Image (cartoon, rainbow, N blue to C red):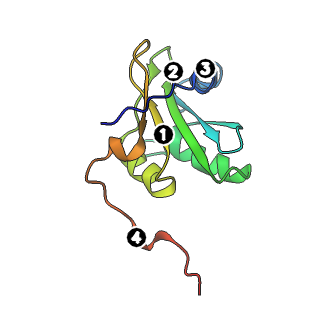
Amino acid sequence: MTTHPHHVDQELVEAAAHVARTRCRGENHTMAAAARARDGRIVTAVNAYHFTGGPCAELVLIGAAAAQGAHELDTVVAVGDRDRGVVPPCGRCRQVLLDYFPALDVIVGADGRLRTVPVAGLLPEGYVWADHRFDAG
């Protein structure tokens, strides 16, 4: 897994941690995510747990970013409630993030050892959804 030499976006980690502390309550919302848009904005979201399989915070974040006009995301991080710290994306989220934002960086690791890695590094031999682009013709 390749680590990027630039520093971890601490402001992004703090934004996700703040949402996890203040908005994640009970079993329906247990994870928060934050992303830095290409224009510098920070977008946040929480998961929507449901026994039928609700969307993870990273997936809710993609929709929230689009609704706010942030269609290009540079970096994403997820943080668990109850001070669990940074939590890496699940397999489904890794695939979806790779499909939407192939150049995305993801913050992973435990406190004090956080690092930034490319999303493709989290999904070696990842499936490439080649037909996801709209036809130009």
The mark closer to the camera, 1 or 2, is: 1
CA gap, disc 1 to disc 2? 22 Å
> What residue is shown with label 1?
105
Q: Earlier in the sequence, mark 4 or mark 3?
A: 3
Q: In x, y percent, where is residue 95?
A: 39, 52
The label shown at residue 81 is 2
Which residue, as the protein is rendered here, is positioned at the far bottom?
137
CA gap, disc 2 to disc 4? 36 Å
> What residue is shown with label 4?
130
CA gap, disc 3 to disc 1? 17 Å
Tags 3 and 1 touching, CB below 8 Å = no
Q: Earlier in the sequence, mark 3 or mark 1?
A: 3
Q: In x, y percent, where is residue 135?
A: 55, 81
- Of the residues shown, which amino acid type is indicated by label 2? Asp
Tags 2 and 4 touching, CB below 8 Å = no
Tags 4 and 3 touching, CB below 8 Å = no
Q: Residues within 10 Å of mark 2 (few under 14, many from 20)?
A: many
The mark closer to the camera, 2 or 4, is: 4
| SS label for mark 4 | helix
Residue drawn at x 51%, y 24% as measured from the top left: 7
CA gap, disc 4 to disc 1? 21 Å
> What residue is shown with label 3?
14
CA gap, disc 2 to disc 3? 13 Å
